């Protein structure tokens, strides 16, 4: 055991006399490397006095500083109203259970360290200043209870190294500024600011800790580097974990819940990764903005009140094998210049699956979406999106686009099953390209209207109740190798001033007909086939060219009525029979002569 120092002997040893001047210490307690190779002097502090006991911690520290060697200061249970400054290689340890020693001056700092210092089992309470400050060297706090009122709990200043282990930090924050740090198995409760702040080039690891009730962030990393592993964060006022100012943040295996805003946020060109983390009940599961670009893998975002994944204002990010469940508004949202890449994502429940809006971009591959209350894929307002290998089930709408000519969506190898309204709806002036897309079981397969354009290649529509493909307004459809099977209405329908160009299309078993063209709709059907046992092959308004049509069903041709053409006069002695619509006709029968009379707009007759 280390030899105990007597205060009187300590005074004599300073003069070079007394037993401590030549005493040999036979036991060592390791504190850093120095404790492993040198012998340590042991000091005992007791407020009740006693042989070889110092009455306060300050006097014991002074005795240890006078000797200039490693010191172990053991403190008996009690309350000590002292402000401590520790220099050199020193360990402060509670003699009783952790929490039995309370150090609390009336105001100001409690502990300032310069050297290699370890603190074990102490309660440190401060007001209006940093409770613990490491000004130089290293500091380790183990099984400590640190309470800060209107100040910082632990302040690791530049070029220092601070370790917090198995400790409780109440109200204040741990601030690492240009320092190294390790936080293990700690509990941060009700911080009035950020619970852990890593700034100005600091490098900190936070492991297996609990952070709750912070007024601002749980962990904030600003222009620094931090690893957050195996932690739980809850009830923070702002983002539970925040990276800003070109920070590097790595989050692994954490659980975040009941957050007022974002669970995880990367902004201002920050980088890093998030792996295996679960978020529940946040406003946004993860948000990326202003040039940040993280990699997010194997994460789950559940019951987020607005969005699961939110990327905006030139934010980027790669999201792999993530899940979003029951998002209140949008599962994955890219807006205002965002540009994420999403691979292997599963979205279920909630309102909208993926939305790309306001000049944003996005690439989405191997995505599964189901059981939403609204649209699965939305592209609006100058946004551009690429969807590959997508499967959508049990949603009212599959893909919905709207906006000016800069609004585009490309969909390749996708399936839309059991939709409530339509699989694809293209509106405004937007442009959509479908390649290898299947729409099965729902009212309407594909629709294009207003001034929009739809390009469909090698696509298939099956078992729809209201129709296969429709063009309306001034919409344009260009389709090659289009197949519509089992429609309870038409296979292809054009109305208004739409333009439909279909090459090598197949329309089978469509109850009302293979194709129906109405209004001033125009276009072509080239090398198409219509098969079935009922209805007509094509009901043509006379404005659609039928080239090499293959069918055994009847084709009904209507001759378009020109505005300058005179009225048609039909004389029929037995009664008229019309095989097609007749416009502006004058009818007479059972007469040898027929007189034509027309009523003018002013009521006169001619």
Image (cartoon, grey):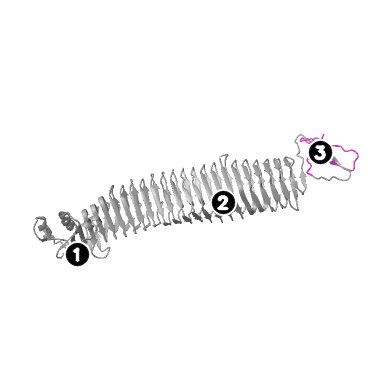
| Residue situated in front as seen by the camera: 254 or 427 | 254
| Residue situated in front as seen by the camera: 222 or 580 | 222
**Residue identified by numbered label 2:** 390
Label 3 or label 2, whichever lies nearer to me, is 2
Label 2 or label 1, whichever lies nearer to me, is 1
Q: Is residue 570 left or right of residue 601?
A: right
Q: In this view, does 121 lie above or below 600?
A: below
Q: How many marks?
A: 3
Q: Quadrant of residue 503?
A: top right
Is 598 part of what is drawn in magenta?
yes
Secondary structure mostly seen in the magenta stretch: loop
**Residue 420 location, x and y as percent?**
62, 54
Label 3 or label 1, whichever lies nearer to me, is 1
**Is the C-beta separation of discs 3 and 1 under 8 Å?**
no
Is 132 part of what is drawn in magenta?
no
Q: Which mark is residue 192?
A: none
Q: Quadrant of residue 236?
A: bottom left
**Residue identified by numbered label 3:** 568
CA neighbours of label 3 inside 10 A, class few (<14), some (14 to 19), many (20+): few
Disc 2 is placed on an element classified as: strand
| Residue situated in front as seen by the camera: 604 or 523 | 523
Q: Distance between the residues labelled 3 and 1?
A: 123 Å
Q: Earlier in the sequence, mark 3 or mark 1?
A: 1
Q: Residue 1 carries which label?
A: 1
**Residue 35 location, x and y as percent?**
22, 57
Disc 1 is placed on an element classified as: loop
């Amino acid at each position: 055991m280390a030899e105990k120092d007597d205060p009187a002997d300590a005074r004599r040893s300073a003069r070079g006399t007394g037993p401590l001047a030549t005493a040999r210490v036979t036991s060592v307690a390791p504190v850093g490397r120095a404790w492993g190779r040198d012998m340590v002097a042991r000091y005992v502090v007791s407020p009740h006095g006693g042989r070889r006991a110092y009455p306060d911690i300050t006097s014991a520290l002074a005795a240890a500083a006078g000797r200039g060697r490693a010191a172990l200061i053991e403190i008996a249970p009690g309350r000590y109203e002292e402000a401590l400054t520790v220099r050199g290689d020193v360990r402060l340890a509670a003699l009783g259970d952790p929490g039995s020693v309370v150090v609390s001056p009336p105001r100001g700092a409690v502990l300032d360290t310069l050297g290699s210092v370890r603190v074990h089992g102490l309660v440190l309470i401060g007001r209006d200043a940093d409770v613990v400050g490491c000004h130089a060297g290293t500091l380790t706090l183990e099984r400590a209870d640190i309470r800060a009122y209107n100040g910082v709990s632990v302040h690791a200043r530049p070029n220092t190294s601070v370790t917090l282990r198995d400790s409780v930090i109440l109200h204040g924050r741990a601030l690492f500024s240009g320092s190294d740090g390790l936080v293990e198995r700690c509990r941060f409760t009700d911080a009035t600011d950020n619970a852990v702040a890593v700034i100005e080039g600091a490098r900190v690891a936070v492991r297996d800790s609990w952070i709750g009730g912070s007024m601002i962030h749980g962990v904030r990393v600003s222009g620094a580097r931090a690893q957050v592993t195996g932690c739980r964060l809850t009830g923070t006022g702002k983002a539970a974990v925040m990276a800003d100012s070109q920070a590097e943040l790595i989050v692994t295996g954490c659980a975040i819940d009941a957050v007022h805003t974002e669970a995880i946020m990367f902004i201002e060109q920050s980088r890093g990764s998030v792996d295996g983390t679960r978020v529940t009940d946040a406003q946004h599961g993860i948000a990326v903005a202003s040039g940040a670009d993280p990699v997010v893998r194997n994460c789950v975002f559940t019951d987020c009140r607005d969005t699961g994944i939110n990327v905006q204002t030139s934010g980027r990010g790669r999201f792999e094998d993530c899940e979003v469940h029951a998002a209140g508004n949008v599962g994955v949202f890219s807006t205002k210049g965002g540009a994420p890449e999403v691979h292997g994502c599963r979205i279920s429940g909630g309102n909208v699956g993926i939305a790309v809006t306001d000049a944003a971009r996005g690439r989405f591959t191997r995505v599964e979406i189901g059981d939403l209350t609204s649209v699965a894929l939305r592209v609006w307002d100058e946004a551009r999106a690429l969807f590959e290998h997508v499967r959508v089930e049990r949603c009212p709408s599959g893909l919905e686009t709207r906006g000016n000519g800069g609004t585009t969506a490309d969909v390749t190898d996708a399936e839309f099953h059991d939709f409530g309204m339509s699989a694809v709806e293209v509106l405004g002036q937007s442009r959509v390209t479908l390649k290898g897309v299947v729409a099965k079981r729902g009212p309407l397969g594909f629709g294009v209207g207003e001034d929009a354009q739809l390009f469909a290649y090698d696509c298939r529509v099956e078992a729809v109740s209201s129709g296969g493909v429709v063009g309306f307004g001034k919409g344009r459809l260009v389709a090659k190798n289009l197949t519509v099977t089992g429609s309870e209405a038409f296979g292809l329908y054009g109305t208004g001033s739409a333009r439909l160009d279909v090459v090598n299309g197949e329309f089978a078993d469509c109850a009302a007909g293979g194709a129906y063209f109405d209004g001033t709709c125009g276009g072509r059907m080239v090398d198409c086939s219509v098969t079935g046992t009922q209805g007509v092959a094509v009901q043509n308004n006379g404005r659609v060219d039928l080239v090499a049509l293959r069918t055994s069903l009847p084709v009904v041709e209507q001759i378009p009525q020109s505005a300058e053409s005179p009225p048609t006069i039909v004389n029929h002695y037995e009664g008229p029979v019309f095989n097609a619509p007749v416009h502006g006709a004058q009818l007479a029968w059972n007469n040898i002569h027929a007189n034509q009379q027309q009523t003018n707009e002013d009521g006169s007759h001619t």
